[in-house]
Image (spheres, helix red, strand yellow):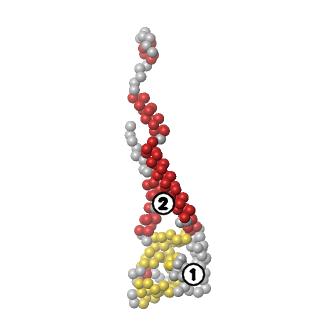
């Protein structure tokens, strides 16, 4: 009988839910949900923007970057309208496509990494935002706990079908003589 090893459910769930995020973060790639209409019509509320961290020296006019607004402490993705170098610093001015006025100037060292928007996926931001809520995190932890308990119970007690299969295989190994064989020889053993 060959024993097949099963992959633990918790490991599979971890790989599905967490590894992709860790890999993306390792490459400096992040996912953000757009919540305002300041970049309409190109980027709308509910869209998902995917960003990649790059040094300030690679930023050019016309690109969309994501930065932290110092007033609201929330991320904003706006278009770069000017880039100037001042010694070891770079000054970047941005503006939302739908906004009438530019934002303030961002000043950072030339080696500072800033998030550049590399792609936009329409409407997918709400799904990502929903997965980051407390309720979704609680449900995910509950699911992982349930999978862990299921795995432990299965490892400890096995499944009924496995036990039945083992019993059937055990019966096949015991040779039971054919009753008709004894009757045919004139012996009446039962």
**What residue do we see at 52% from left, 71% from top?**
32
Q: Position of residue 62 (x, y in %)?
A: 51, 81
Q: Which residue is mark 1?
A: 96
Residue 17's disc is 2
> Which residue extends farthest bottom?
86
**What residue do we see at 55% from left, 83% from top?**
95
Corner quadrant of residue 158: top left
| Alpha carbon distance from label 1 to label 2 | 33 Å
Q: Label 2's element? A: helix
Categorize mark 1 by other alpha carbons within 10 Å: few (<14), some (14-19), many (20+): many
Q: Earlier in the sequence, mark 1 or mark 2?
A: 2
**What residue do we see at 43% from left, 81% from top?**
56
Q: Position of residue 105 (x, y in %)?
A: 50, 86
Residue 115, placed above or below residue 159: below
Residue 91, placed above or below residue 134: below
* Residue placed most toward the observer, 8 or 134: 134
* Residue placed most toward the observer, 53 or 174: 174
Q: Quadrant of the N terminus?
A: top left
């Amino acid at each position: 009988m060959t024993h097949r090893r099963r992959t633990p459910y918790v490991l599979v769930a971890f790989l599905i839910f967490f590894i992709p995020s860790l890999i993306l973060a390792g490459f400096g790639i992040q996912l953000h949900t757009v919540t305002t209409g300041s970049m309409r019509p190109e980027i709308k509320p509910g869209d998902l923007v995917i960003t990649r961290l790059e040094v300030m020296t690679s930023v050019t006019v016309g690109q969309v970057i994501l930065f932290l607004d110092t007033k609201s402490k929330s991320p904003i993705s706006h278009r770069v309208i000017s880039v100037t170098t001042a010694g070891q610093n770079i000054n970047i001015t941005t503006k939302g496509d739908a906004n009438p006025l530019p934002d303030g100037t961002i000043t950072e060292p030339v080696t500072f990494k800033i998030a550049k928007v590399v792609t936009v996926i329409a409407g997918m931001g709400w799904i990502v935002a929903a997965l980051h809520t407390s309720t979704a995190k609680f449900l995910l932890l509950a699911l992982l706990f349930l999978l862990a308990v299921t795995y432990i119970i299965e490892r400890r007690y096995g499944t009924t079908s496995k036990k039945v299969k083992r019993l059937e295989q055990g019966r096949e190994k015991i040779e039971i003589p054919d009753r008709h064989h004894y009757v045919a020889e004139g012996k009446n053993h039962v």
